Image (cartoon, helix red, strand yellow):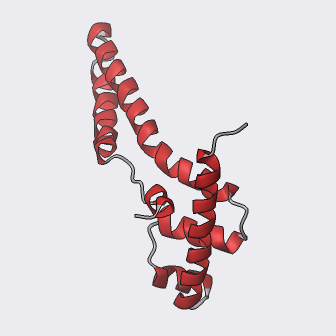
């Protein structure tokens, strides 16, 4: 697989998604056991861990957004990459949103992937 596509298709850890439920449960249990400091503190530590895991899972999309925004390409190319790899839109959906043909979206996407490959190559080169 192309390095650019591999980088851009990285996903949030599916394990991270269940931490939202754990955090909600911990908040409710902290409220229920607010008069018992020992039990409430246990649930506070669970909540802190859940929040840490949630932040880690959401950092993947933030990394993608920051990387795409830093590319030295036209905004419309960045927009296509964002819609495809962050918003998970299809080429047809992107074309409809941006009022371009799907063929033009594929052209912009190709230019974006070339820019991502160049940026990744530059990052991996040792600096003197």
Considering depth in this image, is 48 or 56 the residue closer to the camera? 56
Compared with residue 39, is residue 63 higher up or lower down, i.e. above or below? Answer: below
Q: Residue at x 35, y 19 (%)?
A: 45
Q: Is residue 86 left or right of residue 19?
A: right
Compared with residue 104, is residue 57 higher up or lower down, i.e. above or below? Answer: above
Compared with residue 67, is residue 57 higher up or lower down, i.e. above or below? Answer: above
Considering depth in this image, is 55 or 23 the residue closer to the camera? 55
Compared with residue 102, is residue 117 higher up or lower down, i.e. above or below? Answer: above
Considering depth in this image, is 119 or 55 the residue closer to the camera? 119
Give percent across and percent down for residue 122: 65, 51
Q: Residue at x 49, y 70 (%)?
A: 84
Give percent across and percent down for residue 118: 63, 60
Give percent across and percent down for residue 124: 58, 46
Location of residue 97 by image quarter: bottom right
Q: Residue at x 34, y 13 (%)?
A: 41
Considering depth in this image, is 84 or 124 the residue closer to the camera? 124
């Amino acid at each position: 697989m192309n390095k650019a596509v591999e980088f851009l298709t990285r996903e949030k850890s599916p394990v991270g998604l269940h931490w939202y439920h754990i955090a909600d449960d911990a908040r409710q249990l902290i409220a229920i056991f607010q008069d018992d400091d020992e039990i409430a503190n246990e649930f506070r530590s669970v909540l802190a861990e859940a929040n840490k895991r949630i932040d880690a899972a959401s950092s993947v999309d933030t990394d993608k957004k920051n990387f795409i925004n830093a590319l030295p390409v036209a905004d419309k190319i960045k927009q296509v990459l964002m819609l495809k790899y962050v918003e998970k839109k299809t080429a047809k959906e992107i074309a409809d949103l941006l009022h371009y043909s799907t063929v033009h979206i594929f052209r912009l996407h190709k230019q974006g992937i070339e820019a991502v490959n160049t940026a990744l190559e530059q990052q991996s080169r040792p600096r003197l």
